[in-house]
Amino acid sequence: MPYRSPHLTAVALRLRAWFLLLTLFVVGIRPGSAAPLTTLPTATIPFSSAEQTVRDAIRCPNQIANRPGGVVLLVHGTGGTGANSWAETPYIKILPNLDPGFDVCWIDLPDLAQGDIQMTGEFVAHAITLLALNSTATNGKLTVVSHSQGALDVQWALAFWPQTRGLVSAFVSLAGDFKGSLLATAGCKIVSLFNGGKGCTAATWQQATNSKFLQTLNNAAGLALVPTTSIRSLNDDVVVPQVGENASSVLPWASNVLLQDVKVCGPDQDVNHSEMRIDPGAFALAYEALYRASKAQGSRPFDQKYCKAYVSNNSGWTVMDAQRAIDQSMGNFRSFFDNTPVKSEPPIMPYAQAWAP
């Protein structure tokens, strides 16, 4: 039988989130944290990046043609670019022509997303506000798909630029490290061995479990702020752990989907971190979320046959073709060594100090 994932509608999710926020605020308890719950950020923070700089970083390979599904923004992870992360994936090759049709764009984050995530998060927030103006078919709202660190960029944007929350109708995270990764600290030590003890990139420090950055983000917005689908794999070889409620990709009040769940693709779905961008099962789940956001009502059931082949693919483009995306992106592993290293994570920005540990 086809599996229909238990997503909430946008209205129901917002109502439930605000009710729970109010309840937890009264009792002073925060999900997954010992810190007391504080109010969500509400201040309007001016963008420090020039508008033209952000516009120049956005690419829409199939142009923006006012397709009925609206604009989809793709946000890459650490060490990548928009092109080598997304160009050879189903999100560019297939998604634009799936019902009801989508205008798909990617963004190139500064410094290959190796710098301060607070800055790349602001960059994403700025991009959301600009692209929403072009998403006229969906009344000025867009959807966002992220991979890996991209989830933190999006969540930081939603947390500290509250105007973006009303512009995002759905957020899909592929292998997002909302709780960081236990491997980040070890990765920093390895990089330091090769650069004479100079440390590692700012983004790597910030993605270490219990970093000040992650504590600040989770204190400010450690839950889904918009309708969110977080998809993860037990075979993730970068973001760990991915087991149980402590899984890094699990975000409270999001629809958290494990590919190896027997109701999804089952235990034989072998998908590593990089492959999350091209896995047909993850793509089918993402498409379901995007389809639902593009419609006033209704959804598409998840069919397990799409765990091995792309949904509604009339392009002739196959999973084997998609492997090129992995081959291209591996070249950016050098950016962990080539980008300017720092000996500790960057300080928390003044606007976020109220939520800092």
Image (tube, rainbow, N blue to C red):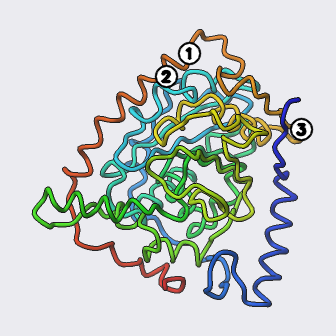
Of the residues shown, which amino acid type is indicated by label 3?
Gly
Query: Label 1 belongs to which residue?
Result: 318
Give the label on residue 322, or none: 2
Residue 33 rendering spot, x and y as whole percentages: 62, 79
In the image, 112: left or right of 341? right
Is residue 132 visible to the viewer in this orientation of the structure? no
Whether tag 2 and tag 1 are in contact, CB under 8 A, the answer is: yes
Q: Amino acid at mark 2?
A: Ala
Farthest residue in the front direction? Answer: 267
Secondary element under disc 2, as helix, strand or loop, is: helix
Location of residue 255 in the rendering, given as x and y in whole percent from the top left corner: 74, 53
User: Alpha-carbon distance for marks 2 and 3?
Assistant: 30 Å
Q: Secondary structure at mark 1?
A: loop
Instruction: Compare residues 136 and 221 and report the one nearer the observer.
Output: 221
Quadrant containing the N terminus in the rendered view: top right
Residue 298 shows which numbered tag? 3
